Each structure stands twice: as structure tokens, then as C-alpha cells.
Amino acid sequence: MRTPVLVKDALANRFKRPYFGLRPRKESLAACIRYYGRSIRLVLRFFGRLRVPLGVDVFLAAALAVPLQSHEVYRGFAEAPLESLLPIATSFLALVILSAAISLVSLAVLKFLMNRPLRLRHLLALGLISSVPFGALSAGLIAAKFADGKWGEAVNCRLELAGLFSLGMALVAAIYPLWLQHRSPRVIHVLSRKFCMPSFALVWAAWISISTVLVLLLGPIVAGGVGPIAILSWFALSVLVAATHLGVMSDRYGYPLLGFVVLTSFVFSALGLNHNHEIRTLDTYSREIVADLPKAFEDWLSNRADLAAYKVHQLPYPVFVISAEGGGIYAAYNTALTLARLQDSCPRFAQHTFAISGVSGGSVGAGVFSALAANSARNEENIDCGPATAVDGGYQTITRRFFAQDLLSPLLAGALFPDFVQRLLPVGISTFDRARSLEHALENAWKVADPSGPNLLSGSFKSLWKPDASIPALILNTTEVNRGRRELIAPFRVNLLLAPQTLAHLGSVVDVRVSTAMIASARFPWVTPAATLSTTSGLIQLADGGYFENSGAETAHDMISLLTKSEVDVQPLGKVSTVRVNDEIVRVEFRLIQIRARALPDPASVRGELSAPIDALMNARHERGVLSFRRAFFDLCSSCSLQSLRIDDRVLFRLLDMRDFAYPLGWYLTQRSQERIHAGLGESKRCPLRDRSEVSRSETQINNDCLFTVVFNFLRPLPQGQTSKP
């Protein structure tokens, strides 16, 4: 039996080279605890020296494997591989460079900081770290497969092949540190000496500066060409090199340089020193007297070219008010395409549409349609509105061309380079604002979609609407951060009964660009920051309109209520309102169309303590939109039913069915997703209202088909000799 002295000597010899995973033989419990404790400390010290590569891996894993927007990007690459050849090639090259850089930088750091040669277990750990970029990509590609084979059989096959190829690249990346250590030790030695010198800071500072300047000068063009995956990888590579160098300098000199940089950026942001999200304003209408909502409606109505015909036939003048729900790119495309098909099918539609209440993505779609109407819609006395639905037409063609552009890459480039650099500066530079990158992307997409005409998205917001034209007025909803109330962007004053505007009057008193107004309403949490605006009463901060109410129905309902309850200009008369126009009474009939999505509710489950408050806020936000719509539905059409649709209903809705497919909440939409939305738009010839008095609203496609039938009936041609409405 061994003596305690021999046990002590044996443990001392063994602890000279401890490693994790092997237990000492038949020793005391205290000795085992000390042994494992020292082994764990060495493991933590090893990975602590690689904290930056590990952080980059976590960022890439979260960005490439999890979000639905990333899955949509993969599907876009897979459905058109030849058209996406440049983004695919740049993404692959960027990920290869990033994986190799993780290996090289990690080996150089360990070579510099460790006093003994790297062992096999160290190289295997480095291989695991280096394989994460391609491993996350492989997981994202497999998760991106369509569940419905009708839409994605060929795409799914390409995604599976790409996922397997990425998995193979991950294995190559895992072996690369071993090969590099045994075949190129001289390269690692030289790199460790150069990389760990203080002067190397000039290299990565120049690198990030050049990348930032390129994004500022050529943002929408370059970003759209290389794609979002390459931009993410390039940003991760920049952070890897810069932050690792700062970490090595911190370990070398004993000063927490990396922590100091991170803390400084937080302090700058907390104090508002580097805030750069001011709204781009124009001075064109700063001194003009602006009309309010009732006066603007009166001017608009008096300028309708076909108003006299309705007076002759003693018919109320039909007026549409639209509400467009938020939801990112899919809501924008759904809104713009629905309105475009209505206008293609019935060219009188824009002439009778007074306003569109948009929220978030719905505001972007509404802005695109209003710009299209400004180019092509006519305000004439005799415009045909046939009974057939135009499944294709000029408005729909330009709309599809507009949303075929990549709006995500310019936003990512602006957020990850100029706006990221801004977080490190104590002075705000408005040019670095990532929201402006998205605004420029919208303007560039309009140039591509409609190159023949002027770029209306870069023009004046107030000038877009004219009371004598067939252009719907944009009423874009935002949320004022300071008070949590609704703030509207409109070309005239909109002082609603229950929600008066603040002194900003953005879009009327303070004019902005159309793209700026659209994005001011679509300020997603963290993706696009809250915007600030200077007013006579101080600064106000505007966030996404969906914080307050995501359907837009509440604003549309309040507008109709104001126009039918004004004591000066409007008097209610049952379903038909009377409006005084140039000392003459005009009968008006309002109809509300809401464009929204129908999705399955979240499955019933118990949320965790961290996620439950966030889920409750998000679900309450959605439910508030549902309640706003139902309040408008029953107030404006008390005899209507949510279960059935009749030909004379005054509240209609176009539903985007999301029960079988979840569209991404972002700024990139594939052709297949566009085709899904396009297929569900609706056609009047399929509507069964011709054979029955009502149809069920529960069937999404029937509801969408009959929307066109009801609109066509509402705007039907005026027959000769008719004296009353049938």
C-alpha cells in the first residue's frame, strides 16, 4: 500500500501536465477536485484566449441558421442559381476566407500567448471553431426547404445538395488547422509576430474605413450584387481581425482595451452622443398653409371628373379608404400587388380611392402604389371598369419588378459598416444612418422598376398627392416613442377626434422624401432605428407604427368617422353621407378595404420567464390590430357579418393566407414567395356571388375572389337614363 507521501509525489508529477477528461487513479476526493478544478481553469483560459473567434461563431450561427429571412435568401439562391451566380460565388468565397481567417488568427494568437507547443486536442478545438461558419450555413440550408412540394421540389433538391456540400466544407475547415500547423508553421510564426504588434491596428483600421467608404458610395449597387451572406461574412471577418488584435493587446499589456472599446460604445449610445438617425427633411413647403383633413377631402371630391355624372343619376359618390397591415416585405408586396391588380382591372379605382392608411411594410406597399398612380392613373369622366379581373397589367408588372430587387443587402451593408462604426464615435454622422441605406435602396429599386419616368420615391412627399389627380393620399402610421401615441405622416393635417397630431405634422408642414416617409413608418425593432425630428416644441422620436396598432384600420376608421361627423362640412345620413362642396350638398358612400394576413395562432404552451413578457407584448400588439379591425367593421357596417360576404358590404378585406407558409419579416422576398402571394390575389370570375346572395369569408380564396366582384359592382358603369340606385 502506498504511503501518503508517495501519493502526494504522484499527484504532483501528474499535475505538471493536466488535461481535461482523465481522472486520477484511486486518489482522494480532494485531490480529484483539485485536479479537475485546475483542468477546467486551463480549458477556460484556452477558450478565453479565443473569445473573439467564439463570439464571431455565435453571431454567424444565429444569423445563418435561425432567421426565416436567411432561409428566404437561401431559397432565392436555389430557385435561380444562374441569375444569383455572383452572390453565390461571393458568399462562398467570403465564407472560405472567414473560415481560413479563424484558423490563422486563432493559431497566431495561441502561438503568441502560450508558452508550449499546441497539442492535438488544441488543434481539434480550433478545427471545431473554424467549421462553425459552414456548419451554420449547412443547417440553414436544410431548414430552408419548402414543406409544400408543389412550390419547391426542385428548390428543395438544390438546397439539400448545397447543405451537404456546406457540411463537407465544414469538415475541410475542421481539418485545416491540423494541416496548417504541420505544413506551414513558418506562416503561423510570422503572422503571430506581425499580428500581435501594436502597429497592426493601422491595418484593420484602414480595412474597416475602406469598407465603410465603399458602402457609402456604392451601397445599393455593390450590396445587391454580392448578397447578404457575403456582407455578413465580410463584417464577421472585420470584427474577427480588429477585436482579436485588441484582445491580444489587452492580454499582452494588461489593459482591457477590448472591454474599454465596448464600454465606450455603450456609454456613447446611452448618452445619445452618437445618435445619427435624424429624418431627412425638405424645405419646399415649410411656410405654406396646410389644409386639414375635411378641407382636403372637400378639395379632392370637388375635383373628381366623374362627380357630375353621379349627381345626374342621383347616386352617392363611391369613395374607398384602404388600410394596409404591417409585416415587412411580404406585407409591402401584398399591399402593392393587391392595389395594382385592382387598378389594372378597374382603372377607375385610384380615382375613387381617397387615402391609404399604412403601417410598417404596408406603408411601403402603399407608397409604391401611390407613386404608380401618380405616373399613370387618370382623373377623367368616362373610364371603363369591366367585370373581368386583369391577372396581369402594367401596374402589376412594375410592382413585381420593384419587389424583385434585393432590399436586404443595402440595409445590412449600411448597418454593419457605417452605422456600426458610428457606435464607436462620440459625434453623430447622419450619413452613416442605416435607415438611409434602406431609403436609398427603395429609390434605386424604383429606378430599375420604372426607368422611363421620374424617381417619385426620391421626390417630395407632399407634392406626390394632388387633390385634382387620381393619387391616393398616403396616411402613414408611426409611434411616438416619448408618449407612446400615434403620429401620422400625411400630406395634410390629420387631427383626428381621438388622436390629434403633434406639432410635427410630418409630411405636410415638414416635408420629406417619399422613401423617407415610407421607412419612418417601417422602423422594425433594432433592424431600423427609431427616427428623430426637431420641432418647435423640441425633439420627437418616431418608431414603427406597429407598436401602436399594426393593422392601420383604426386610423382609417377614425378618418371615415371624422368625415361623417364633422359639424361644419359633413352631415350623416344613414349609410350615405352628405358633404358640402362649393355650397352644394354631395352624397358620398364610404367603403373600407383592409389588406391583412391570416395566420395560425401560436400553439398553446408555457413560455419561459425570459420569453413570456416579449411574447405577451408581441401577441397583444397583433390582437390590438384585430380588435381595431373588428371595431371598424361593425361600426361602419352594422349589418355585416365576419362569416359571410354580400355584394353590398361596406367593409372588405383581402387576406394573405399564412397558415401553410411563414413569410419572412425582412426585406428580401424570393420569386416563389411572390408567386404564392400572386396566386392568392383573387379573380372575380371565380366568385360565386353571381349565383347566391352571400358567400363564406372563412374560405380565404373565395373571399379574395369576391373582393374584386364587390369593388366592380361598387364602381360599375352608370347606365343611361338611370335615376335611382337599384
Image (cartoon, rainbow, N blue to C red):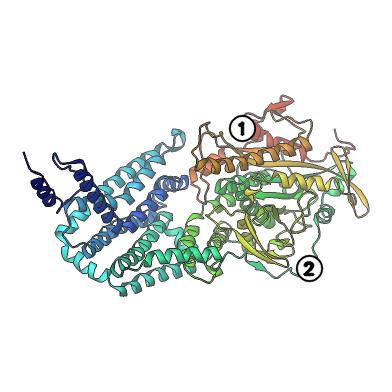
Q: The residue under label 1 is which amino acid type?
A: Thr
Q: CA distance from mark 1 to mark 2?
A: 46 Å
Rendering coords of residue 517 (x, y %): 64, 59
Q: Which mark is residue 341?
A: none
Count neighbours of disc 2 (C-alpha within 10 A) and say few if under 14, some if 14 to 19, many if 20 or more.
few
Residue 277: give x, y in percent of width and height. Answer: 58, 64
Q: Residue furthest right?
A: 583
The residue at which mark 2 appears reads as: 288
Residue at 43 percent across and 55 percent down: it is 228
Q: Residue 108 vs residue 431: left or right?
A: left
Camera-nearest residue between 571 and 617:
617
Mark on residue 700? 1
- Report the quarter where the N terminus lies: top left
> How many C-alpha atoms fall within 10 Å of the one at disc 1: few (<14), some, or many (≥20)?
some
Does 634 sit left or right of 533 as displayed? Answer: right
Please tell me whether mark 1 sits on a helix, a strand or a loop.
helix
Q: Nearer the viewer, residue 21 or 335?
A: 21
- The image shows residue 563, relative to residue 707, as above or below, that is below
Taking 45 as reference, is 572 above or below it? above
**Nearest the eye: 212 or 102:** 102
Vertical placement of residue 515 versus 336, above or below: below
The reply to whether residue 93 is visible in this rendering is: no
> Residue at the spot x=51%, y=71% of the render?
426
- Quadrant of the image containing the C terminus: top right
Q: Is residue 247 visible?
A: yes
Q: Is residue 382 left or right of residue 143?
A: right
